[in-house]
Amino acid sequence: MVFLNIIRVLSKSIREYMKPTLLTPLFVIGEVIFEALIPYMIAMLVNEIKAGCGTDRILHYAWILVVMSLVSLLFGYLAGVTCAQASCGFAKNLRHDVFYRIQEFSFSNIDRFSSASLVTRLTTDIQNIQMAFMMIIRTAIRAPLNLVMSFAMAYYMGGSMALIFLVVIPILGIGLYAVARVTMPLFRAGFPKYDAMNESVEENIKGIRVVKSFVREDYESDKFHTASENIRRIFTKAERILALNGPLMQMCMYSVMVFVLTVGSRLIITTNGEAIDIGQFSTLLTYSFQILSSLMMLSMIFVMITFSAESAGRVKEVLLEKSTITNPENPDHDIEDGSIDFEDVSFSYSENADRPVLEHINLHIRSGETIGIIGGTGSSKSSLVQLIPRLYDVTGGSVKVGGKDVRSYDLEALRDSVAMVLQKNVLFSGTIAENIRWGNKNASDEEVKAVCRMACADEFIDQMPDGYQTMIEQGGTNVSGGQKQRLCIARALLKKPKILILDDSTSAVDTRTDAKIRQEMRNYIPSTTKIIIAQRTSSVEDADRIIVLDNGKIDAIGTSEELLRSNEIYREVYFSQHHQEREEESPIALQEAAA
Protein backbone atom coordinates (compact mmCIF):
# COMPACT_ATOMS: atom_id res chain seq x y z
CA MET A 1 0.00 0.00 0.00
CA VAL A 2 2.84 2.37 0.90
CA PHE A 3 4.65 1.50 -2.33
CA LEU A 4 1.51 2.22 -4.37
CA ASN A 5 1.18 5.59 -2.67
CA ILE A 6 4.79 6.42 -3.60
CA ILE A 7 4.11 5.47 -7.24
CA ARG A 8 0.96 7.61 -7.25
CA VAL A 9 2.87 10.66 -6.01
CA LEU A 10 5.93 10.27 -8.25
CA SER A 11 3.95 9.39 -11.39
CA LYS A 12 2.58 12.95 -11.46
CA SER A 13 5.99 14.03 -12.73
CA ILE A 14 5.69 12.00 -15.96
CA ARG A 15 3.39 14.60 -17.60
CA GLU A 16 4.45 15.30 -21.23
CA TYR A 17 6.50 12.09 -21.30
CA MET A 18 3.43 9.90 -20.90
CA LYS A 19 3.44 9.01 -24.63
CA PRO A 20 6.95 7.44 -24.69
CA THR A 21 6.17 5.88 -21.30
CA LEU A 22 3.17 4.05 -22.80
CA LEU A 23 4.85 3.28 -26.15
CA THR A 24 7.83 1.57 -24.50
CA PRO A 25 5.81 -1.42 -23.15
CA LEU A 26 4.02 -1.75 -26.52
CA PHE A 27 7.32 -1.97 -28.38
CA VAL A 28 8.62 -4.42 -25.77
CA ILE A 29 5.55 -6.63 -26.30
CA GLY A 30 6.25 -6.71 -30.04
CA GLU A 31 9.91 -7.54 -29.41
CA VAL A 32 9.03 -10.40 -27.02
CA ILE A 33 6.40 -11.93 -29.32
CA PHE A 34 8.84 -12.23 -32.19
CA GLU A 35 11.62 -13.49 -29.90
CA ALA A 36 9.28 -16.21 -28.64
CA LEU A 37 8.27 -17.25 -32.17
CA ILE A 38 11.81 -17.51 -33.54
CA PRO A 39 12.72 -20.77 -31.67
CA TYR A 40 9.41 -22.26 -32.80
CA MET A 41 10.26 -21.50 -36.42
CA ILE A 42 13.73 -22.99 -35.91
CA ALA A 43 12.12 -26.19 -34.55
CA MET A 44 9.93 -26.39 -37.64
CA LEU A 45 12.99 -25.90 -39.84
CA VAL A 46 14.87 -28.68 -38.00
CA ASN A 47 11.91 -31.05 -38.50
CA GLU A 48 11.73 -30.11 -42.20
CA ILE A 49 15.43 -30.83 -42.62
CA LYS A 50 15.01 -34.12 -40.73
CA ALA A 51 12.19 -35.03 -43.12
CA GLY A 52 14.51 -34.41 -46.09
CA CYS A 53 13.23 -31.07 -47.44
CA GLY A 54 14.91 -29.29 -50.29
CA THR A 55 16.88 -26.04 -50.44
CA ASP A 56 13.81 -24.02 -51.34
CA ARG A 57 12.14 -24.88 -48.00
CA ILE A 58 15.30 -24.07 -46.08
CA LEU A 59 15.52 -20.66 -47.84
CA HIS A 60 11.82 -20.10 -47.15
CA TYR A 61 12.33 -20.55 -43.41
CA ALA A 62 15.60 -18.59 -43.55
CA TRP A 63 13.80 -15.54 -44.98
CA ILE A 64 11.08 -15.83 -42.35
CA LEU A 65 13.70 -15.99 -39.60
CA VAL A 66 15.59 -12.98 -41.02
CA VAL A 67 12.42 -10.90 -41.22
CA MET A 68 11.32 -11.91 -37.71
CA SER A 69 14.79 -11.10 -36.34
CA LEU A 70 14.80 -7.67 -38.01
CA VAL A 71 11.30 -6.87 -36.78
CA SER A 72 12.26 -7.95 -33.26
CA LEU A 73 15.41 -5.83 -33.52
CA LEU A 74 13.36 -2.83 -34.71
CA PHE A 75 10.93 -3.17 -31.82
CA GLY A 76 13.88 -3.46 -29.40
CA TYR A 77 15.50 -0.32 -30.86
CA LEU A 78 12.27 1.68 -30.63
CA ALA A 79 11.73 0.47 -27.07
CA GLY A 80 15.24 1.64 -26.17
CA VAL A 81 14.66 5.10 -27.69
CA THR A 82 11.28 5.69 -26.05
CA CYS A 83 12.53 4.27 -22.75
CA ALA A 84 15.45 6.74 -22.72
CA GLN A 85 13.11 9.65 -23.57
CA ALA A 86 10.61 8.66 -20.88
CA SER A 87 13.11 7.97 -18.08
CA CYS A 88 15.30 11.05 -18.70
CA GLY A 89 12.23 13.26 -19.09
CA PHE A 90 10.63 11.85 -15.95
CA ALA A 91 13.84 12.49 -13.97
CA LYS A 92 14.02 16.05 -15.32
CA ASN A 93 10.43 16.75 -14.27
CA LEU A 94 10.98 15.13 -10.89
CA ARG A 95 14.02 17.32 -10.22
CA HIS A 96 11.99 20.34 -11.32
CA ASP A 97 9.10 19.43 -9.00
CA VAL A 98 11.35 18.76 -6.01
CA PHE A 99 13.37 21.95 -6.57
CA TYR A 100 10.26 24.09 -6.91
CA ARG A 101 8.77 22.50 -3.82
CA ILE A 102 11.94 23.39 -1.91
CA GLN A 103 11.60 27.02 -3.10
CA GLU A 104 8.23 27.14 -1.33
CA PHE A 105 9.64 25.81 1.94
CA SER A 106 9.89 28.00 4.99
CA PHE A 107 13.08 28.04 7.02
CA SER A 108 11.41 25.57 9.39
CA ASN A 109 10.90 23.07 6.56
CA ILE A 110 14.51 23.39 5.42
CA ASP A 111 15.74 23.00 9.00
CA ARG A 112 13.73 19.77 9.23
CA PHE A 113 15.42 18.16 6.21
CA SER A 114 18.83 19.94 6.23
CA SER A 115 20.38 21.34 3.06
CA ALA A 116 22.73 18.35 2.61
CA SER A 117 19.81 15.92 2.69
CA LEU A 118 17.88 17.97 0.12
CA VAL A 119 20.89 17.95 -2.20
CA THR A 120 21.15 14.14 -1.87
CA ARG A 121 17.46 13.76 -2.68
CA LEU A 122 17.80 15.99 -5.75
CA THR A 123 20.81 14.07 -7.08
CA THR A 124 21.52 10.53 -5.85
CA ASP A 125 17.94 9.62 -4.95
CA ILE A 126 16.43 10.87 -8.22
CA GLN A 127 19.17 9.09 -10.17
CA ASN A 128 18.19 5.84 -8.43
CA ILE A 129 14.52 6.48 -9.21
CA GLN A 130 15.35 7.16 -12.87
CA MET A 131 17.16 3.81 -13.17
CA ALA A 132 14.27 2.00 -11.49
CA PHE A 133 11.73 3.74 -13.74
CA MET A 134 13.73 2.74 -16.81
CA MET A 135 13.69 -0.90 -15.71
CA ILE A 136 9.99 -0.83 -14.78
CA ILE A 137 8.72 0.40 -18.15
CA ARG A 138 11.00 -1.82 -20.19
CA THR A 139 12.72 -4.72 -18.42
CA ALA A 140 9.89 -5.26 -15.93
CA ILE A 141 7.51 -5.67 -18.89
CA ARG A 142 9.90 -7.70 -20.99
CA ALA A 143 10.98 -10.19 -18.32
CA PRO A 144 7.59 -11.49 -17.10
CA LEU A 145 6.08 -11.38 -20.59
CA ASN A 146 9.04 -13.29 -22.01
CA LEU A 147 8.72 -15.71 -19.10
CA VAL A 148 5.03 -16.38 -19.82
CA MET A 149 5.47 -16.60 -23.59
CA SER A 150 8.49 -18.88 -23.31
CA PHE A 151 6.77 -21.11 -20.76
CA ALA A 152 3.66 -21.38 -22.98
CA MET A 153 5.78 -22.30 -25.99
CA ALA A 154 7.92 -24.69 -23.92
CA TYR A 155 4.78 -26.43 -22.67
CA TYR A 156 3.46 -26.57 -26.22
CA MET A 157 6.73 -28.07 -27.48
CA GLY A 158 7.82 -30.16 -24.49
CA GLY A 159 4.61 -30.97 -22.67
CA SER A 160 4.86 -31.95 -19.01
CA MET A 161 8.64 -31.39 -18.93
CA ALA A 162 7.99 -27.63 -18.87
CA LEU A 163 6.24 -28.01 -15.51
CA ILE A 164 9.69 -28.02 -13.88
CA PHE A 165 9.53 -24.21 -14.11
CA LEU A 166 6.43 -24.16 -11.92
CA VAL A 167 8.56 -25.74 -9.20
CA VAL A 168 11.53 -23.40 -9.64
CA ILE A 169 9.65 -20.08 -9.79
CA PRO A 170 8.10 -20.30 -6.25
CA ILE A 171 11.49 -21.28 -4.79
CA LEU A 172 13.06 -18.24 -6.43
CA GLY A 173 10.20 -15.98 -5.34
CA ILE A 174 10.42 -17.06 -1.71
CA GLY A 175 14.19 -16.51 -1.75
CA LEU A 176 13.90 -13.00 -3.22
CA TYR A 177 11.22 -12.05 -0.70
CA ALA A 178 13.44 -13.18 2.17
CA VAL A 179 16.33 -11.12 0.79
CA ALA A 180 14.10 -8.03 0.52
CA ARG A 181 12.93 -8.37 4.11
CA VAL A 182 16.53 -8.17 5.31
CA THR A 183 17.96 -5.56 2.92
CA MET A 184 15.20 -2.92 2.97
CA PRO A 185 15.90 -1.80 6.57
CA LEU A 186 19.61 -1.62 5.73
CA PHE A 187 19.00 0.67 2.73
CA ARG A 188 16.64 2.74 4.88
CA ALA A 189 19.43 3.24 7.40
CA GLY A 190 22.04 3.82 4.70
CA PHE A 191 20.66 6.87 2.92
CA PRO A 192 20.90 9.19 5.95
CA LYS A 193 24.60 8.27 5.91
CA TYR A 194 24.76 9.77 2.41
CA ASP A 195 23.24 12.94 3.85
CA ALA A 196 25.89 13.04 6.56
CA MET A 197 28.69 12.62 4.03
CA ASN A 198 27.32 15.36 1.77
CA GLU A 199 26.97 17.63 4.77
CA SER A 200 30.62 17.00 5.62
CA VAL A 201 31.68 17.85 2.05
CA GLU A 202 29.48 20.96 1.91
CA GLU A 203 30.75 22.22 5.26
CA ASN A 204 34.37 21.58 4.30
CA ILE A 205 34.17 23.38 0.95
CA LYS A 206 32.34 26.38 2.41
CA GLY A 207 34.88 26.70 5.21
CA ILE A 208 37.98 25.69 3.25
CA ARG A 209 39.81 28.94 4.16
CA VAL A 210 39.23 28.31 7.87
CA VAL A 211 40.29 24.67 7.48
CA LYS A 212 43.57 25.67 5.84
CA SER A 213 44.27 28.58 8.16
CA PHE A 214 43.95 26.27 11.20
CA VAL A 215 45.75 23.41 9.40
CA ARG A 216 42.82 21.07 10.00
CA GLU A 217 42.98 19.19 6.70
CA ASP A 218 43.80 15.92 8.47
CA TYR A 219 40.86 16.33 10.86
CA GLU A 220 38.46 17.04 7.98
CA SER A 221 39.88 14.11 5.99
CA ASP A 222 39.32 11.81 8.96
CA LYS A 223 35.77 13.10 9.37
CA PHE A 224 35.04 12.49 5.69
CA HIS A 225 36.66 9.06 5.87
CA THR A 226 34.43 8.15 8.82
CA ALA A 227 31.28 9.25 6.96
CA SER A 228 32.38 7.43 3.81
CA GLU A 229 33.29 4.30 5.79
CA ASN A 230 29.85 4.27 7.42
CA ILE A 231 28.25 4.25 3.97
CA ARG A 232 30.59 1.52 2.74
CA ARG A 233 29.93 -0.68 5.75
CA ILE A 234 26.14 -0.54 5.65
CA PHE A 235 25.81 -0.83 1.87
CA THR A 236 28.37 -3.63 1.72
CA LYS A 237 26.29 -5.54 4.24
CA ALA A 238 23.11 -4.94 2.23
CA GLU A 239 24.68 -5.80 -1.12
CA ARG A 240 26.32 -8.91 0.34
CA ILE A 241 22.83 -10.16 1.14
CA LEU A 242 21.52 -9.06 -2.26
CA ALA A 243 24.36 -11.01 -3.84
CA LEU A 244 22.57 -14.20 -2.71
CA ASN A 245 20.33 -13.61 -5.73
CA GLY A 246 23.13 -14.83 -7.96
CA PRO A 247 23.75 -18.24 -6.35
CA LEU A 248 20.00 -18.76 -5.94
CA MET A 249 19.47 -18.00 -9.62
CA GLN A 250 22.36 -20.21 -10.69
CA MET A 251 21.04 -23.09 -8.61
CA CYS A 252 17.60 -22.80 -10.21
CA MET A 253 19.07 -22.43 -13.69
CA TYR A 254 21.38 -25.43 -13.54
CA SER A 255 18.74 -27.57 -11.84
CA VAL A 256 16.39 -26.89 -14.75
CA MET A 257 19.10 -27.49 -17.34
CA VAL A 258 20.12 -30.80 -15.75
CA PHE A 259 16.49 -31.91 -15.62
CA VAL A 260 15.74 -30.93 -19.23
CA LEU A 261 18.92 -32.48 -20.61
CA THR A 262 18.54 -35.69 -18.59
CA VAL A 263 14.82 -36.28 -19.07
CA GLY A 264 14.75 -34.99 -22.66
CA SER A 265 17.71 -37.11 -23.78
CA ARG A 266 16.25 -40.16 -22.05
CA LEU A 267 12.88 -39.67 -23.79
CA ILE A 268 14.48 -39.29 -27.22
CA ILE A 269 16.55 -42.44 -26.75
CA THR A 270 13.89 -44.63 -25.13
CA THR A 271 11.02 -43.64 -27.42
CA ASN A 272 13.15 -43.30 -30.53
CA GLY A 273 11.99 -39.68 -30.95
CA GLU A 274 8.28 -40.41 -30.72
CA ALA A 275 7.63 -38.70 -27.35
CA ILE A 276 9.85 -35.77 -28.28
CA ASP A 277 11.97 -35.28 -31.36
CA ILE A 278 15.29 -33.46 -31.85
CA GLY A 279 13.61 -30.24 -33.06
CA GLN A 280 11.32 -30.08 -30.07
CA PHE A 281 14.18 -30.88 -27.73
CA SER A 282 16.46 -28.14 -29.12
CA THR A 283 13.58 -25.65 -28.99
CA LEU A 284 12.80 -26.65 -25.42
CA LEU A 285 16.42 -25.95 -24.50
CA THR A 286 16.19 -22.51 -26.18
CA TYR A 287 13.00 -21.70 -24.28
CA SER A 288 14.65 -22.92 -21.11
CA PHE A 289 17.43 -20.40 -21.60
CA GLN A 290 14.88 -17.65 -22.31
CA ILE A 291 12.89 -18.53 -19.19
CA LEU A 292 15.99 -18.54 -17.03
CA SER A 293 17.17 -15.31 -18.64
CA SER A 294 13.81 -13.76 -17.77
CA LEU A 295 14.18 -14.93 -14.20
CA MET A 296 17.62 -13.37 -14.09
CA MET A 297 16.17 -10.09 -15.39
CA LEU A 298 13.47 -10.23 -12.72
CA SER A 299 16.17 -10.70 -10.13
CA MET A 300 18.00 -7.59 -11.40
CA ILE A 301 14.74 -5.62 -11.39
CA PHE A 302 14.11 -6.76 -7.87
CA VAL A 303 17.56 -5.59 -6.75
CA MET A 304 17.15 -2.19 -8.42
CA ILE A 305 13.66 -1.59 -7.09
CA THR A 306 14.70 -2.72 -3.60
CA PHE A 307 17.62 -0.28 -3.74
CA SER A 308 15.58 2.63 -5.12
CA ALA A 309 12.44 2.14 -3.00
CA GLU A 310 13.97 4.08 -0.11
CA SER A 311 15.08 6.83 -2.53
CA ALA A 312 11.52 7.05 -3.84
CA GLY A 313 10.19 7.37 -0.31
CA ARG A 314 12.65 10.16 0.49
CA VAL A 315 11.71 12.12 -2.63
CA LYS A 316 8.03 11.60 -1.89
CA GLU A 317 8.59 13.13 1.54
CA VAL A 318 9.81 16.35 -0.06
CA LEU A 319 6.99 16.46 -2.61
CA LEU A 320 4.33 15.99 0.07
CA GLU A 321 5.91 18.34 2.59
CA LYS A 322 3.67 21.34 3.18
CA SER A 323 5.30 24.66 3.88
CA THR A 324 4.67 25.87 7.41
CA ILE A 325 4.14 29.34 5.91
CA THR A 326 1.45 29.67 3.25
CA ASN A 327 -0.70 32.34 1.65
CA PRO A 328 -4.15 33.03 3.12
CA GLU A 329 -7.20 32.29 0.96
CA ASN A 330 -7.76 35.90 -0.12
CA PRO A 331 -4.42 37.63 0.47
CA ASP A 332 -3.83 41.39 0.48
CA HIS A 333 -1.41 42.55 -2.19
CA ASP A 334 -1.19 46.24 -1.31
CA ILE A 335 1.10 47.27 1.54
CA GLU A 336 0.29 50.82 2.56
CA ASP A 337 3.56 51.82 4.23
CA GLY A 338 6.55 50.56 6.19
CA SER A 339 5.09 50.86 9.67
CA ILE A 340 5.70 47.79 11.88
CA ASP A 341 3.85 46.69 15.01
CA PHE A 342 4.80 43.81 17.30
CA GLU A 343 1.83 43.06 19.55
CA ASP A 344 2.61 40.69 22.43
CA VAL A 345 4.80 38.58 20.15
CA SER A 346 6.31 35.31 21.30
CA PHE A 347 8.30 32.94 19.12
CA SER A 348 9.95 29.51 19.33
CA TYR A 349 11.81 27.57 16.65
CA SER A 350 10.43 24.31 18.02
CA GLU A 351 7.19 23.33 19.71
CA ASN A 352 9.23 21.32 22.21
CA ALA A 353 11.52 24.19 23.19
CA ASP A 354 11.99 24.73 26.93
CA ARG A 355 11.45 28.47 26.59
CA PRO A 356 10.54 30.81 23.72
CA VAL A 357 13.21 32.67 21.79
CA LEU A 358 11.16 35.88 22.01
CA GLU A 359 8.72 36.67 24.81
CA HIS A 360 5.92 39.27 24.93
CA ILE A 361 7.46 41.74 22.49
CA ASN A 362 5.47 44.97 22.16
CA LEU A 363 6.97 47.41 19.70
CA HIS A 364 5.57 50.09 17.37
CA ILE A 365 7.71 51.50 14.57
CA ARG A 366 6.52 54.40 12.43
CA SER A 367 6.99 54.32 8.67
CA GLY A 368 10.27 55.97 7.68
CA GLU A 369 11.86 55.62 11.14
CA THR A 370 15.42 54.44 11.57
CA ILE A 371 15.56 51.85 14.34
CA GLY A 372 18.72 50.43 15.84
CA ILE A 373 18.74 47.05 17.59
CA ILE A 374 21.55 46.12 19.93
CA GLY A 375 22.09 43.27 22.35
CA GLY A 376 24.44 40.49 23.31
CA THR A 377 24.99 37.25 21.42
CA GLY A 378 21.90 35.08 21.67
CA SER A 379 19.58 37.98 22.51
CA SER A 380 17.39 37.04 19.47
CA LYS A 381 18.01 40.16 17.37
CA SER A 382 17.95 38.23 14.08
CA SER A 383 14.96 36.17 15.18
CA LEU A 384 12.99 39.39 15.78
CA VAL A 385 13.47 40.84 12.30
CA GLN A 386 12.92 37.51 10.52
CA LEU A 387 9.31 37.62 11.66
CA ILE A 388 8.66 40.78 9.59
CA PRO A 389 8.86 39.17 6.08
CA ARG A 390 7.45 35.89 7.49
CA LEU A 391 10.63 33.88 7.19
CA TYR A 392 9.17 32.39 10.36
CA ASP A 393 5.70 32.81 11.83
CA VAL A 394 5.03 33.96 15.38
CA THR A 395 3.89 31.37 17.89
CA GLY A 396 2.01 33.99 19.87
CA GLY A 397 0.71 37.51 19.26
CA SER A 398 0.97 39.20 15.87
CA VAL A 399 3.32 41.19 13.65
CA LYS A 400 1.75 43.92 11.53
CA VAL A 401 3.16 45.77 8.53
CA GLY A 402 1.26 48.75 7.16
CA GLY A 403 -1.35 48.21 9.85
CA LYS A 404 -2.22 44.65 8.79
CA ASP A 405 -1.12 41.27 10.12
CA VAL A 406 1.70 39.91 7.94
CA ARG A 407 -0.21 36.62 7.71
CA SER A 408 -2.95 38.39 5.74
CA TYR A 409 -0.58 39.45 2.94
CA ASP A 410 0.40 37.64 -0.22
CA LEU A 411 3.85 36.24 0.58
CA GLU A 412 5.45 37.51 -2.60
CA ALA A 413 4.01 41.00 -2.15
CA LEU A 414 5.12 41.12 1.50
CA ARG A 415 8.65 39.95 0.84
CA ASP A 416 8.96 42.19 -2.20
CA SER A 417 8.35 45.18 0.07
CA VAL A 418 11.06 44.08 2.53
CA ALA A 419 14.78 43.97 1.72
CA MET A 420 17.14 42.13 4.03
CA VAL A 421 20.91 42.23 4.14
CA LEU A 422 21.61 39.20 6.29
CA GLN A 423 24.45 38.57 8.68
CA LYS A 424 25.75 35.85 6.35
CA ASN A 425 25.89 37.64 3.02
CA VAL A 426 25.38 35.54 -0.08
CA LEU A 427 26.46 36.32 -3.63
CA PHE A 428 25.77 34.10 -6.61
CA SER A 429 27.83 32.99 -9.60
CA GLY A 430 27.64 35.71 -12.26
CA THR A 431 28.84 39.25 -12.85
CA ILE A 432 28.74 42.01 -10.24
CA ALA A 433 26.00 43.75 -12.25
CA GLU A 434 23.91 40.57 -12.35
CA ASN A 435 24.23 40.18 -8.59
CA ILE A 436 23.17 43.79 -7.97
CA ARG A 437 20.17 43.36 -10.29
CA TRP A 438 18.73 40.77 -7.90
CA GLY A 439 17.24 43.90 -6.32
CA ASN A 440 15.63 44.97 -9.61
CA LYS A 441 16.15 42.86 -12.72
CA ASN A 442 15.09 45.75 -14.98
CA ALA A 443 17.47 48.33 -13.49
CA SER A 444 19.61 50.31 -15.92
CA ASP A 445 23.41 50.40 -15.76
CA GLU A 446 23.23 53.92 -14.29
CA GLU A 447 20.91 52.78 -11.51
CA VAL A 448 23.25 49.90 -10.70
CA LYS A 449 26.23 52.26 -10.53
CA ALA A 450 24.27 54.74 -8.41
CA VAL A 451 23.43 52.26 -5.65
CA CYS A 452 27.00 50.95 -5.72
CA ARG A 453 28.22 54.52 -5.11
CA MET A 454 25.82 54.83 -2.16
CA ALA A 455 27.07 51.53 -0.72
CA CYS A 456 30.70 52.63 -1.32
CA ALA A 457 31.13 49.55 -3.52
CA ASP A 458 32.27 51.61 -6.52
CA GLU A 459 35.59 52.16 -4.74
CA PHE A 460 36.73 48.60 -5.44
CA ILE A 461 34.56 47.80 -8.48
CA ASP A 462 36.22 50.55 -10.55
CA GLN A 463 39.63 49.08 -9.73
CA MET A 464 38.71 45.67 -11.13
CA PRO A 465 39.82 44.94 -14.73
CA ASP A 466 36.28 44.15 -15.91
CA GLY A 467 34.46 46.59 -13.64
CA TYR A 468 30.80 45.71 -13.25
CA GLN A 469 31.26 42.73 -15.58
CA THR A 470 33.73 41.10 -13.17
CA MET A 471 32.65 37.52 -12.49
CA ILE A 472 31.76 36.63 -8.92
CA GLU A 473 32.77 33.08 -8.07
CA GLN A 474 30.39 30.72 -6.33
CA GLY A 475 29.60 32.07 -2.88
CA GLY A 476 31.55 35.29 -3.58
CA THR A 477 34.88 33.73 -2.65
CA ASN A 478 36.87 36.16 -4.84
CA VAL A 479 35.79 39.27 -2.89
CA SER A 480 36.52 40.18 0.72
CA GLY A 481 33.99 40.19 3.54
CA GLY A 482 33.64 43.98 3.48
CA GLN A 483 33.28 44.06 -0.30
CA LYS A 484 30.65 41.35 -0.15
CA GLN A 485 28.70 43.32 2.46
CA ARG A 486 28.74 46.49 0.36
CA LEU A 487 27.55 44.62 -2.74
CA CYS A 488 24.68 43.11 -0.76
CA ILE A 489 23.72 46.55 0.60
CA ALA A 490 23.73 47.94 -2.95
CA ARG A 491 21.51 45.07 -4.05
CA ALA A 492 19.03 45.88 -1.27
CA LEU A 493 19.04 49.61 -2.04
CA LEU A 494 18.22 48.93 -5.69
CA LYS A 495 15.00 47.28 -4.54
CA LYS A 496 13.73 50.56 -2.96
CA PRO A 497 11.74 48.63 -0.34
CA LYS A 498 9.25 49.92 2.18
CA ILE A 499 11.31 48.23 4.92
CA LEU A 500 15.09 47.75 4.88
CA ILE A 501 16.67 45.40 7.42
CA LEU A 502 20.44 45.41 7.91
CA ASP A 503 21.37 42.46 10.10
CA ASP A 504 24.90 43.26 11.28
CA SER A 505 25.67 43.85 7.61
CA THR A 506 28.44 46.44 8.07
CA SER A 507 30.51 44.51 10.61
CA ALA A 508 33.38 44.09 8.09
CA VAL A 509 33.28 47.76 7.03
CA ASP A 510 35.27 50.54 8.74
CA THR A 511 33.34 53.12 10.78
CA ARG A 512 33.89 55.95 8.27
CA THR A 513 32.43 53.89 5.40
CA ASP A 514 29.64 52.67 7.69
CA ALA A 515 28.64 56.26 8.50
CA LYS A 516 28.78 57.26 4.85
CA ILE A 517 26.50 54.33 3.84
CA ARG A 518 23.94 55.28 6.51
CA GLN A 519 23.93 58.89 5.33
CA GLU A 520 23.38 57.82 1.73
CA MET A 521 20.50 55.58 2.81
CA ARG A 522 18.81 58.46 4.63
CA ASN A 523 19.01 60.62 1.51
CA TYR A 524 18.09 57.90 -1.05
CA ILE A 525 15.19 56.19 0.73
CA PRO A 526 13.91 58.68 3.33
CA SER A 527 10.42 57.14 3.51
CA THR A 528 11.75 53.58 3.97
CA THR A 529 11.69 52.13 7.46
CA LYS A 530 15.26 51.16 8.28
CA ILE A 531 16.12 48.59 10.94
CA ILE A 532 19.82 48.29 11.75
CA ILE A 533 21.07 45.39 13.86
CA ALA A 534 24.62 46.06 15.00
CA GLN A 535 27.27 45.09 17.50
CA ARG A 536 28.86 48.56 17.29
CA THR A 537 27.01 51.37 19.01
CA SER A 538 28.46 53.80 16.44
CA SER A 539 26.31 52.09 13.77
CA VAL A 540 23.07 52.96 15.63
CA GLU A 541 23.95 56.18 17.50
CA ASP A 542 22.11 58.38 15.02
CA ALA A 543 19.00 56.14 14.86
CA ASP A 544 15.64 57.66 15.80
CA ARG A 545 15.32 55.00 18.48
CA ILE A 546 17.45 52.13 19.73
CA ILE A 547 16.02 48.85 21.04
CA VAL A 548 18.08 46.96 23.60
CA LEU A 549 17.32 43.23 23.57
CA ASP A 550 18.28 40.87 26.36
CA ASN A 551 17.44 37.14 26.36
CA GLY A 552 14.56 37.55 23.93
CA LYS A 553 12.94 40.48 25.75
CA ILE A 554 13.02 44.23 25.21
CA ASP A 555 15.16 45.69 27.99
CA ALA A 556 14.88 49.33 26.92
CA ILE A 557 13.93 51.66 24.05
CA GLY A 558 15.23 55.18 23.49
CA THR A 559 17.75 57.41 21.79
CA SER A 560 21.47 56.94 22.38
CA GLU A 561 21.55 59.79 24.92
CA GLU A 562 18.52 58.46 26.80
CA LEU A 563 19.92 54.95 26.99
CA LEU A 564 23.29 56.21 28.21
CA ARG A 565 21.51 57.76 31.15
CA SER A 566 19.05 54.95 31.88
CA ASN A 567 20.19 51.55 30.58
CA GLU A 568 23.06 49.56 32.06
CA ILE A 569 23.41 47.14 29.10
CA TYR A 570 23.70 49.93 26.50
CA ARG A 571 26.03 51.96 28.70
CA GLU A 572 28.36 48.98 29.21
CA VAL A 573 28.53 48.25 25.47
CA TYR A 574 28.97 51.92 24.62
CA PHE A 575 31.84 52.56 27.00
CA SER A 576 33.63 49.33 26.09
CA GLN A 577 33.78 50.42 22.44
CA HIS A 578 35.05 53.99 22.88
CA HIS A 579 38.48 55.39 23.56
CA GLN A 580 39.76 55.98 27.08
CA GLU A 581 39.26 59.75 26.79
CA ARG A 582 35.61 59.19 25.94
CA GLU A 583 35.25 56.85 28.92
CA GLU A 584 36.71 59.54 31.20
CA GLU A 585 34.46 62.31 29.85
CA SER A 586 31.22 60.35 29.84
CA PRO A 587 30.82 60.00 33.65
CA ILE A 588 31.18 63.79 34.03
CA ALA A 589 28.61 64.38 31.29
CA LEU A 590 26.29 61.88 32.93
CA GLN A 591 26.67 63.58 36.32
CA GLU A 592 25.86 66.95 34.77
CA ALA A 593 22.81 65.48 33.00
CA ALA A 594 21.63 63.85 36.23
CA ALA A 595 22.02 67.15 38.10
Image (cartoon, rainbow, N blue to C red):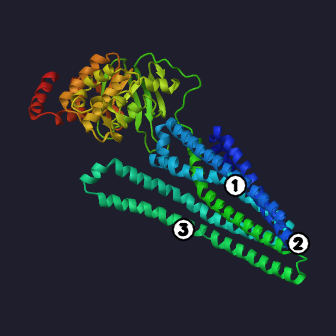
Which mark is nearer the camera, 3 or 1?
1
Question: Of marks 3 and 2, which one's residue comes earlier in the chain?
Answer: 2
In the rendered structure, the answer to whether residue 58 lies left or right of residue 336 reads right
Identity of the residue drawn at 64% across and 43% down: 9
Q: Which mark is residue 237?
A: 3
Q: Position of residue 94 (x, y in %)?
A: 58, 43
Disc 2 secondary structure class: loop
In the rendered structure, the answer to whether residue 266 lies left or right of residue 468 reads right
Q: Position of residue 85 (x, y in %)?
A: 61, 45
Disc 3 secondary structure class: helix
Quadrant containing the C terminus is: top left
Q: Residue type at mark 3: give it.
A: Lys
Q: Which residue is mark 2?
A: 51
Residue 525 sits above or below residue 197 on the image: above
In the rendered structure, the answer to whether residue 361 lies left or right of residue 187 reads left
In the rendered structure, the answer to whether residue 17 lies left or right of residue 265 reads left
Identity of the residue drawn at 15% across and 33% down: 578
> For residue 539, which quarter of the picture?
top left
Which mark is nearer the camera, 1 or 2?
2
Viewer-nearest residue: 584 or 413: 413
Q: Residue type at mark 1: give it.
A: Leu
> For residue 17, which quarter of the picture?
top right
Residue 85 visible in the displayed image: yes
Residue at the far bottom: name it: 270
Question: Of marks 3 and 1, which one's residue comes earlier in the chain?
Answer: 1
Residue 456 sits above or below residue 577 on the image: above
Q: Which residue is mark 1?
A: 73
Q: Local crowd at mark 3 within 10 Å, few (<14), some, or many (≥20)?
A: some
Viewer-nearest residue: 528 or 458: 458
Q: Residue type at mark 2: give it.
A: Ala
Viewer-nearest residue: 329 or 551: 329
Which mark is nearer the camera, 3 or 2?
2
